[in-house]
Amino acid sequence: MRDPAVLGMATLRYLSAAVELTAATLMLRYGKVSTAVSINAALGLFGPTLFVIVSAVGIWGLAQSGSVSWARLAMIFAGVILIVYAARR
C-alpha cells in the first residue's frame, strides 16, 4: 500500500504536467507571441502555488507519520515559505 501523502503529491505533479503540456499546446495553436506570453504569465502563478500545495501535502504526511518533530516540521514549512518569498523578489 502506498502512502496517501506520496500518492497525493504524485497526483498533483501529474496534474501540473498536464497543465504545462496543455499550455504549450495552446501556445502552438494560437501562434502569437502576445498570447504565449499571457499563457506563460498564468503558468508563472500556477507553479509556485502548486509547489506550496505539494509541499504542504508532504509536510502533512510527515506530521502524520510522527517520524519528524514539530520543530523540524516548522522549519521545513518556514523553508518552503522562504523559497516562495525569495522567488517573488
Image (tube, rainbow, N blue to C red):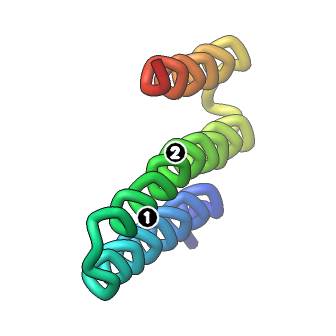
Nearer to us: label 2 or label 1: 1
How far from the left and from the top, in percent, is residue 4?
Answer: 64, 63
Q: Residue at x 45, y 48 (%)?
A: 44
Mark positioned earlier in the residue sequence (2 or 1): 1
| Residue 70 in the image: above or below residue 30 | above
Question: Residue at coordinates 31% horizontally, 87% vertically from top-left?
Answer: 29
Would you identify the image quadrant in which residue 67 lies?
Answer: top right
Location of residue 86 (image quadrant): top left
The amino acid type found where label 1 is placed reads Ile
Q: Looking at the image, which residue sits at the far bottom?
A: 29
The residue pinned by badge 2 equals 51
Q: Amino acid at mark 2?
A: Phe
Give percent across and percent down for residue 64: 73, 42
Residue at point 53% right, 17% down?
Answer: 82
Observer-nearest of 72 and 50: 50
> Which element is circle 2 on?
helix
- Name the residue rendered at 45%, 52% in the picture: 41
Q: Residues within 10 Å of mark 1 (few under 14, many from 20)?
A: some
**Residue position for label 1:** 39
The Cα atoms of the two marked residues, 2 and 1, are separated by: 18 Å
Q: Quadrant of the N terminus?
A: bottom right
Residue 78 lies, in percent from the top left, at 61, 17
Question: Toward which corner of the image does residue 59 lie, by quadrant?
Answer: top right
17 over 88 or under it: above or below: below
- Which of 60 and 26 lies nearest the eye of the viewer? 26
Pointer 2 local density, CA inside 10 Å: few below 14, some 14–19, many at least 20: some
